[in-house]
Amino acid sequence: MIRKSIVSLLILILLQPIFAKKIIIKMATLAPEGTEWHGLLVDLGQRWQKETNGEVRLRIYPGGVVGDETDMVRKMRIGQIHGAAMSTEGMSEINPYFTSFYMPMLYQSYDEVDYVREKLNEELITKTEENGFKLLTMVDVGWVYWFSTEPVLIPSDLKKLKIFIWAGDYKSTQLYETHGYQPIPLAMTDVLSGLQTGLISAIGFNPMYTLAQQLFGIADNMLDMKWGNLTAAIIVDMKTWNRIDSKYQEVMLSVAQDIGKGFQEKNRYESDKAIGVMEEYGLKINRPNPSQFNEWETLIEKMTPDFRGTVIEEKAFDRLMDIMKEMESH
């Protein structure tokens, strides 16, 4: 009887890997299927599955099928999905230090972006974990420009247009209104229809996304001025992350960072290609002269005090300003 029990126990131990419940991570993104950003997640899922011997699998929900980035955060918190690849908009819902990447015209080179991100690395990682999410990798996908239905060269041109603002971003809405602009809060998934109906007429977007979504067919003017840098991150909620065997966590994190680094090195400069393609199909590039560019700098200088404690959280703003002073002194 004892021998029979031992044999049964041995069989169960041998079969345990077969019966072990595999972890499926449901991950959402606004990136349309077939884009480079979506391809990064496909690659991530394939490598995770290989490195964990099939124990961890990634199920991707692209193109905003889960909703806007604020919806993704909410659904991660209630367990409907387990991870997301999100821009600063969604990440700032989790960690206020991500609002540091909101500042218009602050970044004009990738060296500046890398410097700030390196200096804020600890706050970006630890505060994200404290709020319940594992930050796997951070990347950026190039610059943000103004695309519009009418030419924009100076701030007063933009004031005539209806500007897309993320739904729920009440602070940015109030800030733009205070300075005489016409912000229209809208879900990211409704941008195309908003342009088609005239509900909005100006969008601050990355060229790769604008091309992928064919938004330039309506917003067929681009202001050739770096408005901001599109920073993004891949996260998994800590409850799901903690269910993963520690021996797999390390390799999964390494894979995510490796893929993120390769993606960034390749795609930072894809924006120029995307602009070229759109220009071939009718996009008009509007290049401000030095005097017109100065008008934008004057506008941002005037708006900067109003960013503190509104669009950018106070501690994050003060830390960012200290970093910028430190960078200028080098």
Image (cartoon, grey):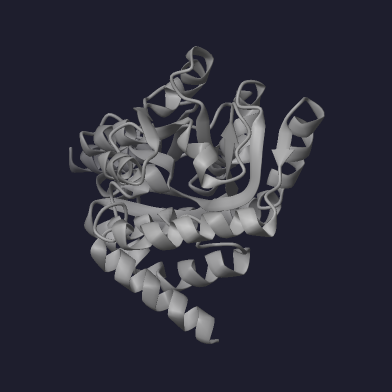
In the rendered image, the residue lying farthest to the bottom is 330
Q: Position of residue 98 (x, y in %)?
A: 37, 56
Q: Position of residue 270 (x, y in %)?
A: 71, 46
Which of 296/172 is in front?
296
Q: Position of residue 319 (x, y in %)?
A: 33, 72
Which of 49/282 is in front?
282
Q: Is residue 237 above or below residue 110?
A: above
Res 261 quadrant in image = bottom right
Task: Identify the residue shown where x is 81% and y is 30%.
Answer: 280
Res 14 quadrant in image = top left
Q: Position of residue 210 (x, y in %)?
A: 61, 32
| Left-right relation of 260 to 162 | right
Task: Identify the residue shown where x is 42% and y is 53%.
Answer: 102
Q: Is residue 187 above or below residue 11?
A: above
Task: Identify the residue shown where x is 38% and y is 70%.
Answer: 320
Residue 58 visible from this viewpoint: yes
Task: Identify the residue shown where x is 47% and y is 24%.
Answer: 191
Res 286 quadrant in image = top right
